[in-house]
Image (spheres, helix red, strand yellow):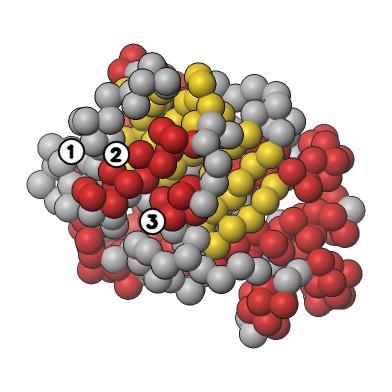
Amino acid sequence: MKKQINGQVPLSNLIFTVNWEDPESDMKAIEMKTGQSLLTITSGGCNTLNFLLYDPEKIYAVDINPAQTWLMELKLAAIKNLDYDEFITFLGLRKSEDRMALFTKLKHDLSIDANHFWMSNISLIKKGILFKGKFEGFVKIAGKMLALLQGKRKVEKLLACQSMDEQKDFFNSEWNNKRWRLIFKLMFNKKRLAKKGLVAEYFHFDDGAQSFSESFYNRTKKVLCDIPVKNNYFLSVYFRGKYKNESELPSYLQPQNYEHLRRNIDRIHLATADTKYWLKTMPDAFIDGFCLSNICELMSEEDTKILFTEVWRTARPGAKISFRNLMIQREVPGDLTGIRKNEKMSSMLLANDRSFVYSKVAAMMLSNHNQK
C-alpha cells in the first residue's frame, strides 16, 4: 500500500460501503466504450465494479480515504476467491452465521494495511459490510423515521408502483403530507449530516433553496414524480436501508455478470491519494474517462484549478468527464477553455439521475487538446 499523498482533507473512517452515484449517468457522461482507461473515485467501489463489465483497458480507482481503499480491496479479494452465492452472502445480501469462514478464504489477497483494518473491524465482517458506513448509518436512521411517520405499508406501496401515473397520483394523494416534510427538517440538516461524516463545509449551496432540507425535499419530490420507481434500487436503499430484492441490484451484484467481473478484476488499480496530486505523478494523455464525484466541494478554487489542469494534461484526445456536486456549485475554472460542459446532456443526466442527492450531474468534454 502506497503512503497517502497529502492534500485536501485527511480521512480514515469508513464513510461509504456502497456508491450513491447513479452509474448509468456516469457511463452516459463519459460515453463508456470497450478498451477505455478510466479514473474513478473509489468511494464504496460499486460503480468502479459496474464499469468493469464494459471491458475497460484499466480503471484507476483513487480515494483520499484509506478506509475506502481497504473496502475496495476487500470486495476485490472476495470476487477473486468466492463463488457468487458466497460473495453476496459475505457482503450481507443473504443471512449467514459464519462470514468469518468466508473472510478466511480471501484475506490472503489483502494488503497488510487492509488486513489490519478489517481485523480491527471484525464486527463489520460478521454483519456483512454493505450499508455499514457512517453515511449509510445516517440513511438507516432516516429510513426508520420514514417508516415510523409514513408507515411501512405506505413505503412498500410506493416502491411497488408500476407506472409514472401511479407514482404521481400516489405521491400527491397519500405521500406528500406534513409528516413527510417533517422528516427533512429533522434529519436533513447540516449539523446532523456533519455528525455522519459529511462536514459542515459541504452545506453552502446555490440551487435556489433556502436550506439543505428544502433542497433535498425538492430533489426527492422530483425523483418520486418524474423517474420510475421500478428498478430504482437507490430509492429502496434510502427508504428501507437495503436493496428491495435480489432482482433489483447494481449490475456488479447480478449473478449473470459475476464471471465477467472475475475475468476483468485485475484491470482495477487502487491508490490512496488526493486525486489532483495523484494525477501529477501520471504521464500525459493516458485517460479516456474521468468520473469525478463530489471531490471539489472541500477544495479551494486554487486546488480545483490544479485538479482540472491535471485532468486536461492526462486526458487522451476525445476524453470525457462526469462531474458531480452535492451542494457546492463548484465549476471548472473559466480560463481552462479546453474543458467545456455539454449543456444538453448535463440537463438530461440530472433530470434522469436515479440517485437524487446531487445538485449537479455534468457531462464535460475536452476540446482543442493540443492547444493548452
Residue 227: x and y in percent read: 43, 27
Outermost residue on the left side: it is: 210
Residue topped by disc 3: 146
Mark number displayed over residue 207 = 1
Mark 1 and mark 2 in contact (Cβ < 8 Å)? yes
* Picture quadrant where residue 322 is located: top left
In the image shown, does 359 or 288 lie closer to the viewer? Answer: 288
State which tag comes first along the sequence, 2 or 1. Answer: 1
Q: Secondary structure at mark 2?
A: loop
* 320 in relation to 186, above or below: above
State which tag comes first along the sequence, 3 or 2. Answer: 3
3 or 2: mark nearer the eye: 2
- Residue type for callout 2: Ser
- How far apart in space, not on screen, are marks 2 and 1 (Cα)? 7 Å
3 or 1: mark nearer the eye: 1
- How far apart in space, not on screen, are marks 3 and 2 (Cα)? 22 Å
Q: Quadrant of the N terminus?
A: bottom right
Name the residue located 59 percent from the left edge and 43 percent from the top edge. Answer: 47
- How far apart in space, not on screen, are marks 3 and 1 (Cα)? 25 Å
* Picture quadrant where residue 215 is located: top left
State which tag comes first along the sequence, 3 or 1. Answer: 3
- Residue type for callout 3: Leu
Q: Is residue 158 visible?
A: no
Residue 134: x and y in percent read: 46, 68
- Residue type for callout 1: Asp
* 370 in relation to 278, above or below: above
Q: Is residue 334 visible?
A: yes
Give neighbour class at mark 3: few <14, some 14-19, many 20+ (Cα, 10 Å).
many
Residue topped by disc 2: 359
Name the residue located 68 percent from the left edge and 82 percent from the top edge. Answer: 116
